[in-house]
Image: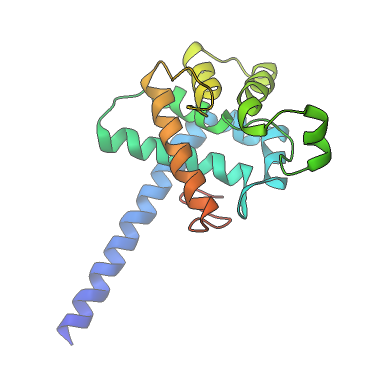
Amino acid sequence: MDFMRNYKQRRRERLRKLYERHKQLRRLIKEHGGDILDSVNFQSTRKHIQHGTMTVHNHCMDVACYSLLLNKKLGLNCNKHDLIRGALLHDYFLYDWHDKEYLSQRKRLHGFHHPMTALHNAEKEYQLNDIQREIIKKHMWPLSVVPPACREAWVVTAADKYCSFMETVGLHRGHGACAS
């Protein structure tokens, strides 16, 4: 009986800690990217699927969360403001990349051209600094050929690869670490 009671208590404590971590991540994202989260265009990313069943919106939220977690775990001391804003805007391409008609007009592969499209769209709406631009431009490395030049861009690139893999193999399905 004591074993089960201890097990349930440890489980409740673990869930409480996860919930608190989730709240802290959401608070940081809202603090540094509230204007992005509230924008009509960012809200429109809820309509497009990224990988598997994950929306572009939830993918970007997850990449922001995992970027923060990776930064903390590795003690990289990245600028959280730039990290969050770059992660939220890294896939700000604002179209359904699965739409064959749209892509046939582009005559280019989405994976190669969407970082510049996302950067162009983000610059129209937000004041970006060089680090945020670097994150958006280079998050598809090695497809972008030139590797990221700052820690923040490397962290977002790694978080994006992790999230994309998990979504593609079906381990993150239409929700995620920070999905709202």
Residue furthest to the top in view is: 130
Q: Tell me which corner region of the image, top left, top right, bottom left or bottom right, holds residue 43.
A: top right
Residue plotted at (71% across, 39% down): 97
Q: How many discs mark residues in the rendered view?
A: 0
How far across and how far down the image is residue 160, in percent? 48, 37
Residue furthest to the bottom in view is: 1
Q: Is residue 163 left or right of residue 126?
A: left
Q: Nearer the viewer, residue 15 or 83?
A: 83
Residue plotted at (39% across, 17% down): 150
Q: Tell me which corner region of the image, top left, top right, bottom left or bottom right, holds residue 104.
A: top right
Q: Tell me which corner region of the image, top left, top right, bottom left or bottom right, holds residue 33.
A: top right
Is residue 79 visible to the viewer in this orientation of the structure?
Answer: no
Q: Is residue 122 left or right of residue 144?
A: right
Residue 23 versus residue 68 in the image, above or below: below
Q: Is residue 79 left or right of residue 47?
A: left
Residue furthest to the left in view is: 2
Q: Is residue 129 left or right of residue 19?
A: right
How far across and how far down the image is residue 137, in percent? 55, 21
Residue plotted at (34% across, 37% down): 70
How far across and how far down the image is residue 125, in percent? 68, 20
Position of the N terminus by quadrant: bottom left
Is residue 158 visible to the viewer in this orientation of the structure?
Answer: yes
Residue plotted at (72% across, 44% down): 98
How far across and how far down the image is residue 3, in percent? 17, 81
